[in-house]
Amino acid sequence: MAGPGPPAVDNFRPGARDGADFLAMTPELETPVRSDADLLAVWQRLMGPGGFGRRSIWFVFLDEDDRLQRVIMPIDDVPEEPDPQVIRNLATIFTELHDDGQFASTAMLLSRPGPGQMTGADRRWARALRAGLGRVSPWPVHLATTDEVRVFAPDDLIAA
């Protein structure tokens, strides 16, 4: 995943990182995130090319000026199906941090190994994340796979 600019965030190698990663800010990552297209570009830049060896949820945090804070928080090895307790815990923690002024909003991305076609489990995770963390995240949830980074459109979030 080497190339010009900061290294892309990657969880392809098990155990390659522990805890939050700090972003190497570059001009394109310092640009305010004010639209869904801006956020998609951020995720594409951060995830980079390549693949993922495990299922993770990634969080970035934005300040009151819509700028990325320097930390990206992954939660690795999440189960294939959403875990309601994990969602409740995240909602509690992030709501407290948000209410204490630690960030203005958060954005979420689900990554997993395999091709880009959305699965039912992907959609269930996106619905659970939106339902549980919608108060602190006005942003659409994204999906990163070996093939691409894409947004979960509103139609993707309709339960079948």
Image: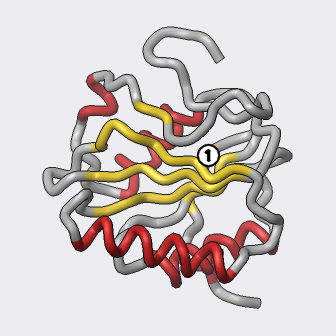
The residue depicted at 56 percent of the width and 41 percent of the height is: 19
Circle 1 packing at 10 Å, graded few (<14), some (14-19), many (20+), is many
Name the amino acid, label 1: Val
The percent coordinates of residue 7 (x first, y second) are 52, 19
Name the quadrant containing residue 142: bottom right
Residue 58 position, x and y percent, is: 56, 51
The count of marks equals 1
Residue 155, picture quadrant: bottom right
Residue beneath disc 1: 149
Between 12 and 158, the one lying in front of the other is 12
Q: Is residue 48 left or right of residue 113?
A: left
Q: Residue 147 location in percent, x, y? A: 74, 40
Residue 18 or 62: which is nearer the viewer? 18
* Vertical relation: 36 (above or below) 68: below
Q: Nearer the viewer, residue 115 or 46?
A: 46
> Which residue corresponds to the image point at 80% horizontal and 46% vertical from the top-left?
54
Q: Quadrant of the C terminus?
A: bottom right
* Image point (32%, 28%), residue name: 28
Tell me where residue 3 sits by quadrant: top right
Judged left or right of residue 46, residue 77 is: right
Secondary structure under tag 1 reads: strand
- How far across and down, in percent of the image, does residue 105 sit? 30, 63
Instruction: Write the residue at 73% across / 74% down.
Output: 82
Q: Is residue 65 left or right of residue 1?
A: left
Give the farthest residue toward the bottom: 160
Q: Quadrant of the N terminus?
A: top right
Looking at the image, which residue sits at the far left?
A: 65
